[in-house]
Image: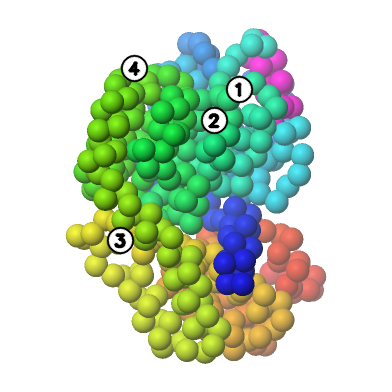
C-alpha cells in the first residue's frame, strides 16, 4: 500500500518540478544573427558567427529555456551549434512531438539546410518528451536532464542522461559498472552535486560533447568522490575513445562493495521519506522535524553515499509535500496546510510553488492583503502558473493586484 502511494506521488514529479537555470556563471554574450522568418515557439536563440554544423533545440519543464541558451553560447560558437529555445514545449502539455517537428522543419528552412543534424535537450518532463520524439524520428542525440529512459531499451540515437545525486529521478539514471548499459557506447550518464534542476554549465557541455562526439576532457561534477570519478573516466574512454572494456570490468569487480552499498541505501529511501511524511500526517511534528533537520543540515562531509542518500530522501519527501500541501489547500485544511508547509520550507526554502501556496493559505485564513503581497512576491521569484492562480483565487482578487 505504502509503495503504491509513493510511486503514485513520484509519477507526478516531472509535472511539478522546479526549473532552475544552471549554477554556473553566464557566458559572455556573442553577437547573434537575427533570422527574419518567424519560428513558432522560438523567441530566443543563438547562431554561430561563421557556420552551423548542427541544431540544438532546448526545452524546459516550465517553458523557460532561455537561460540555458545563454549559458551555452561560448560552447555553441566553438562547436558550430545553433541554439534554439523552444518555449512552447513544457510539462503538462500534449502534442509535444508535433511542436518539436514543426520547430525542426522551420529552423532547418531558416538556416537553409534541410539535413542539419538535430540535438534535443530537455529537463524533467520535457526530457521524457524528447525521448519519446526520438523513438519515432531521426535525431543525432539527446541530452536528458532530470529524467531517464528504459535502460533495457533506450532510444537508438546517442543519449546523455544527466541528474543530480540528490534528484528524486536519480534512480532512472543510475547504473553500476557491471550493468549491461555500461557496454553500450551510445548511452552514458553524467552526475553533478545537486537536486532536481538543470546541471551546471560544465556538466551540460560534457553531455553535449558525448552526443556531439567531441573528444574533449569531460567535466564530471562528482569530483568529491574518487570512485565515481574513476568510473566515469573509464566509461568515457571506452565510449568515446575506444578504450578497454576490460578496465571497466576490473573496476567493477574492485568496487563492487561500494556500489552494493549504494543499492542498499537506494532501496530504502522511498520508505524513509514515506515514514517522515506519515509522522507529519499524524501530527507528530516534533519527531518529523527532527528527521527533516537531519536530512537538510546533517554532516555530509565524510560519507558520500550517506550524504547523497539523505539528499534523495529529502527530494522525495519534497515531492510528497508538494502534492499534499496542494491537497490540503484544496480542502481548506488550514492547520494541516501550515504544518506541511513548514516542513516543505525546510526542504525547499527557495521553491516558488511554496511561496505561491503561502499566498493561498493566507487568503484562506482571511488575511487578504497579506495574501496579495505574498502572491506578488511569488511572481517576482518566477511563479507563472496562471491556471493554478485561477484555481485558488476569485477573479475579483486577481484583478485587484
Query: What residue did someone put label 1 on?
Result: 139
Report if the CB atoms under discs 4 and 2 are less than 8 Å apart. Answer: no
Q: Secondary structure at mark 1?
A: loop
Measured as percent of width and height from the top left, residue 380 is found at 55, 60
Count of numbered labels shown in the rendering: 4
Residue where numbered disc 2 is placed: 142
Displayed quadrant of residue 133: top right
The answer to if 111 sits in the magenta stretch is yes
Considering depth in this image, is 379 or 341 the residue closer to the camera?
A: 341
What whole-number distance in Å separates the C-alpha atoms at marks 1 and 4?
A: 23 Å
Q: Are marks 2 and 3 in contact (CB under 8 Å)?
A: no
* Crowd tier of the residue under label 3, counting other residues whose Cα lies within 10 Å: few below 14, some 14–19, many 20 or above: some
Tell me the residue at 28%/42% (across/down): 228
Examine the rendered structure and indicate whether residue 10 appears above or below residue 199.
below
**Taking the image as drawn, is residue 219 in sight?**
no
Q: Earlier in the sequence, mark 2 or mark 3?
A: 2
Q: Is residue 258 visible?
A: yes
Amino acid at each position: 500500500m505504502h509503495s503504491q502511494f509513493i510511486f503514485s506521488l513520484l509519477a507526478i514529479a516531472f509535472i511539478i518540478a522546479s526549473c532552475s537555470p544552471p549554477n554556473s556563471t553566464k557566458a559572455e554574450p556573442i553577437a547573434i544573427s537575427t533570422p527574419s522568418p518567424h519560428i513558432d515557439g522560438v523567441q530566443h536563440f543563438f547562431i554561430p558567427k561563421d557556420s552551423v554544423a548542427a541544431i540544438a533545440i532546448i526545452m524546459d519543464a516550465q517553458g523557460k529555456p532561455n537561460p540555458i541558451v545563454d549559458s551555452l553560447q561560448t560552447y555553441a560558437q566553438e562547436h558550430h551549434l545553433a541554439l534554439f529555445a523552444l518555449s512552447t514545449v513544457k510539462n503538462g502539455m500534449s502534442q509535444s512531438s508535433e511542436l518539436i517537428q514543426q520547430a525542426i522543419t522551420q529552423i532547418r528552412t531558416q538556416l537553409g539546410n534541410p539535413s542539419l543534424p538535430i540535438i534535443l535537450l530537455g529537463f524533467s518532463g520535457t526530457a521524457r518528451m524528447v525521448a519519446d520524439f526520438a523513438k519515432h524520428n531521426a535525431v543525432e542525440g539527446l541530452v536528458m536532464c532530470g529524467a531517464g529512459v528504459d535502460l533495457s531499451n533506450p532510444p537508438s540515437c546517442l543519449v546523455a542522461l544527466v541528474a543530480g545525486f540528490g534528484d528524486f529521478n536519480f534512480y532512472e539514471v543510475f547504473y553500476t559498472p557491471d550493468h549491461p548499459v555500461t557496454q553500450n557506447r551510445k548511452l552514458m550518464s553524467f552526475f553533478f552535486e545537486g537536486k532536481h534542476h538543470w546541471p551546471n554549465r560544465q556538466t551540460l557541455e560534457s553531455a553535449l560533447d558525448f552526443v556531439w562526439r567531441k573528444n574533449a576532457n569531460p567535466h564530471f561534477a562528482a569530483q568529491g568522490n574518487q570512485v565515481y570519478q574513476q568510473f566515469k573516466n573509464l566509461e568515457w574512454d571506452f565510449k568515446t575513445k575506444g578504450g578497454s572494456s576490460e578496465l571497466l570490468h576490473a573496476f567493477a569487480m574492485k568496487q563492487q562493495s561500494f556500489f552494493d552499498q549504494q543499492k542498499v541505501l537506494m532501496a530504502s529511501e522511498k520508505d524513509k521519506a514515506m515514514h517522515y511524511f506519515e509522522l507529519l500526517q499524524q501530527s507528530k511534528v516534533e519527531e518529523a522535524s527532527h528527521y527533516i533537520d537531519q536530512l537538510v543540515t546533517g554532516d555530509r562531509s565524510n560519507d558520500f553515499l550517506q550524504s547523497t542518500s539523505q539528499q534523495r530522501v529529502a527530494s522525495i519527501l519534497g515531492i510528497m509535500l508538494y502534492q499534499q500541501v496542494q491537497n490540503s489547500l484544496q480542502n481548506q485544511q488550514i492547520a494541516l496546510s501550515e504544518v506541511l508547509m513548514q516542513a516543505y520550507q525546510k526542504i525547499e526554502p527557495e521553491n516558488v510553488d511554496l511561496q505561491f501556496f503561502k499566498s493561498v493559505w493566507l487568503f484562506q485564513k482571511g488575511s487578504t492583503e497579506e495574501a496579495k503581497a505574498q502572491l506578488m512576491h511569488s511572481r517576482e521569484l518566477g511563479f507563472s502558473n496562471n491556471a493554478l492562480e485561477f484555481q485558488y483565487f476569485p477573479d475579483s482578487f486577481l484583478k485587484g493586484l
